[in-house]
Every structure is written in C-alpha cells, then in structure tokens.
Amino acid sequence: MRIRSILAALALAATTPPAIAESPLLNLPNFPDFAMLGVGTGPQYFGSDDRVAAVVPAAQMNFGRRYISLQANYLSINLVDDPRWQAGPAGILRFGRRNVDDPQVAALPEIDMSVGLGGFLGYQIGGPDPRDRLRFGAGVLQDVTGSHGGLVADFGVRRWLPVGKYGALGLSLAGSWASDDYMDTYFSVDDAGSAASGLPVFAATSGWRDLRAMAVFVQPVSKKWAVGAGVLYSYMLDEAGTSPVTLDRDQLYVGIGVARAW
C-alpha cells in the first residue's frame, strides 16, 4: 500500500494510494514509451505517523491508443482504441502491514501481502496539446489471495495544464471506498488484539476510506529524459480515520522521479 502511495506522489502521473485506475502516464512530447525510477517518503503504513523511504519503478509501453502501464505495484492495460475512453484489466500487489514501529500496532496480527484484480474505466477531454486535458476515472480491485478478501473502489478527476514549452502540471482529487472485509482487516481491533496491544476494541465496516489531493510537476530536460516531483495529501475518512490503528488521519507523501524514453 505505501509503495503505491509514494509512487502516486512522485511519478509522472499517478493517483492513489491507494489504488485508482489511471490513464496513461503523461505522454509528453518525445515520451511515448518510458521507464522511470523514483524515490520518495510516506507513512510506514496507511494511517501511520512513522515515515519510511522507498525506491519506486514505473514504465509504460503504448500501442497506438492502447497501452500497458506499470506504476510500482499497480498494473493496468488499456484495451480501448478511442481518443477519449480507456478501459481494461488492472491488478495491484498490496504489501499488507508488518514490521511496524509503533509497539501497540505491532502487537496486532500482521497483514499478509495480497493481490487485487479488477478493472478500470476512464474518460478524458482535451485539445491537441496532450498536456492540456481533463480526465475522469474509476476502478475496482478485488483481493483474490484471501489476505483480506475485500474490494476497493476508486473515483477521481485530474486536470493537466501546460507549463512553459514542454512542462506540465497535474492536479487531481480522488477518493476510495472499501468493503467490509477490507476495512475489517486493516482497521478493526478484536478482543484478542485489544488484549495484546492495549488498543480499544473497534469494528470497522464498509465505507469511504480516504480523500486525496495531489499536485505533480513534470519537466523534460532533453529528448530522452524528464524529471518530476510531486506531493500527495490523503485524509482518512469514516471508520478508517477513527480506528485506533490510525495514528494520524493526515497522510502526506512526497517524492521525485527521473524518466527515460525509448
């Protein structure tokens, strides 16, 4: 979870940590296909007040208007050959929760990694400049490994704006809704967990998990290289925010990245 969130803050495009289905990464001039490496910092787990650093990869290959996009632990494939619509399968590797610094949360059962599978749908409008566009997106990912057995749905809007001759600024808002199984696994504390950790008993049910705002700036520095930097702020909602596992409802991610086209 935290790896994907950090990517969202630093990549050449991105949204949430939480997973939100995305359009292709930015498609700046001379950047049709690329690989990226980024570094950033964010909460140790979703809701933590301790921070960690991470190195994050990303890559994209385009086939006309179709594409394959890897954003850290999130993979999406657009199968639609249309200038405005994108849709296709998606998957995410969630890293669970383990090796936590906070002693009370560390006393709770660890959460195993999981694989979520599903799909995404996007619609965008814009002019001839690929840096000038507005996009609406949604996605759904269901755990297929039995780690939490839940579903997470994401909804978002993004505006890309030209900056100078080649640069671009991306601004976005997004939110995530999660099912009972997901919320229970990540945010509940049962009787045994309360006895082991000292945290109060808490039963989390389905609801809105978080609301996110992000800003990303991307600047090509040559025909083959670009740099990017960004910041993402996430506010945890409903029972995700009031859970005793959540030590800080305000989650901040920052980072930088370097990309090379081919």
Image: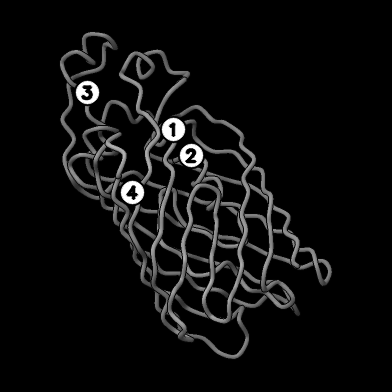
- Residue lying at the far right of the rendered structure: 222
Alpha-carbon span between mark 2 and mark 1: 6 Å
Mark closer to the chain start, 3 or 2: 2
Q: Position of residue 61 (x, y in %)?
A: 61, 67
Q: Which mark is residue 256?
A: none
Quadrant (top left/top right/bottom left/bottom right) for the C terminus: bottom right
The amino acid on which the numbered mark 4 sits, given as a three-letter code, is Asp
Cβ atoms under marks 1 and 3 closer than 8 Å: no
4 or 3: mark nearer the eye? 3
Q: Tag 1: residue type?
A: Tyr
Q: Which residue is mark 3?
A: 189
Query: Where in the figure is residue 234, as x and y percent of width and height?
Result: 42, 48
Residue beneath disc 4: 210
Query: Which quarter of the image is occupied by the N terminus?
Result: top left
Look at the image and name its color scheme: one colour
Mark 4 or mark 3: name the one nearer the start of the chain.
3
Q: Disc 2 or 1, which lies upstream in sequence? A: 2
